[in-house]
Image (spheres, grey):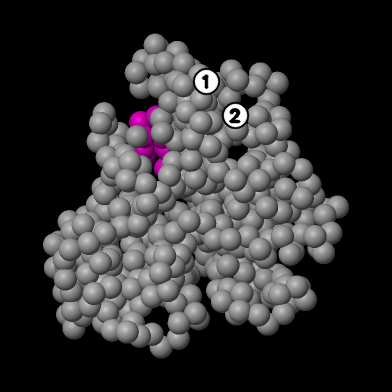
Amino acid sequence: MARLWMDDAETAPLPPWTNPAYLSAVDEIYHDRWAAEKLLRIRWLERSIRHFWPQGHPTRIIHVAGTNGKGSTCRLLEAGLSLAGPAGAMTNPHLFDYAERCSVGGVALSHDQVARLWTKVLRPHSLDRAEEGLERALSFAEAGLLMALHAFDEASACWGVVETGVGGRYAPSMALDPACCVLTNVGRDHPQTLGHQLWQRALEKAGIAREGLPLFTAATGQALDMVRRVADHVGAPLTVVDEDAVQLVREEAADWEGEDSQRGGRPGHAWCNLALALAVIRHLEPGLETARLLPRLLQVSALPGRFWQPKPHVVADVAHNADKVAALAGHLKLRFPGRSLVLVVGISRDRPLAETLAPLVPSARLVILSSASYAGRNPFALEEECHSAFPDLPTEVVEDPARAVERAELVRAPEELVVVTGSAYTLDQAFNPDPLMKRMNAEYGRRGGNH
């Protein structure tokens, strides 16, 4: 089997002389052109924000980064802060529909609003920028962020929660002027861009910290050590939501949920997200009473594609790295103890199948390898990798995700679950009810280049 990510170097304490500012400086010197391009785009986006809001954006922004739980934490913050006034959230990626990426009061933008904001506001601005050079046109991420800011403004939102994409310190969302920053955790994701070592990924994600602004995190171990050092260096007051804080929230929730099935089905990572969001909201809006706030948070539904059951015997989850798949495996054991699985798996980019799939393998009877519509790995190559890593695990290849799910339902035993995972793009092509958006999503990035 391929080497597991978590090795001794990732569990050992950082050397006492670790200086995050020096490491960041050397990193930029070593990758000067790459860093300069990222920083320039952030500068251009700052100018775009000032173009639309010369006096500053009227919505108070919360900037959220991390490996896992970012989207769920954003939705929890949106729901809780809505008790103090209108609140919105921008998350990514979407599952079926681009409009899923931005919501106000938990309601996604309408198709009409997306079309209007793009056609009347953002497209003209993008073309104005492009007149100075085509590379200055708004990127996919920049357009989405500006659209969310306009939606927040139109709704007179008091709070807007913005999820960064990959990384932190070089993300387009660094162009924002937030009131607060949140780092959910640091795990195993995007080694080619964020670094193979845990401390590298922590340095990257903790780079969202700003001087004087509160920073909240549920990071642990070596990652937390690096986060502390970054926060100390930039002068960001740090609040750590640890296991004791999570347990306190569980005890508080028992007063509202009791021992019902919802509480019994809430996995550990969901409690961590809840505790983190609660700590942030209590800091920002201390006047909100627990009697109003906690029941609201406990009722927030999962994001699309997160432990979703389109049928009683089918579970679909966008988990696409080893940490997220491990969380999925734990949730399956909690909700469906002892059930055997038929897996339908597609994987994007260069993610290794063995490390991604390992947490589910002990419960799997069969793996059906399928495709992912964007940057998907060849399912026949995935099958070879699966045979090498798990020689006793039967496999099949069905390239079309929808047909792969049909095949899994056909061959499953009555007591078995079909679990579809590995890539949001696989879930989209398997379950999207809108054939037009399904086709648009499948062709993302194929018309003119690099987003």
Indicate the position of residue 26 as horizontal and vertical percent values: 43, 42
- Element type at marker 2? helix
Residue flagged by tag 2: what amino acid is it? His
Indicate the position of residue 309 as horizontal and vertical percent values: 44, 68
In the image, what residue occupies the spot 38% across and 85% down? 339
Whichever of labels 1 and 2 marks the residue nearer the N terminus, that label is: 1
- Is residue 34 located in the magenta-colored stretch of the structure? yes
Q: Quadrant location of the N terminus?
A: bottom left
Residue 240 visible at all: no
In the image, what residue occupies the spot 23% across and 64% down? 404
Residue 58: image quadrant is top right
The label shown at residue 283 is none
C-beta proximity under 8 Å, tags 1 and 2: yes
Residue 161: image quadrant is top right
Position of residue 242 relative to residue 332, above or below, is above
Q: Label 1 neighbourhood size at 10 Å, few (<14), some (14-19), many (20+)?
A: some
Q: Residue furthest bottom?
A: 338
Position of 199 with respect to 432 (left or right) is right
In the image, what residue occupies the spot 45% across and 54% down? 201
Which span is picked out in magenta?
23-37
Q: Nearer the viewer, residue 243 or 382?
A: 382
Q: CA distance from mark 1 to mark 2?
A: 9 Å
Magenta stretch, main secondary structure class: helix
Position of residue 4 relative to residue 446, above or below, is below
Indicate the position of residue 242 as horizontal and vertical percent values: 65, 68
Indicate the position of residue 329 as horizontal and vertical percent values: 42, 75
In the image, what residue occupies the spot 63% across and 60% down? 300
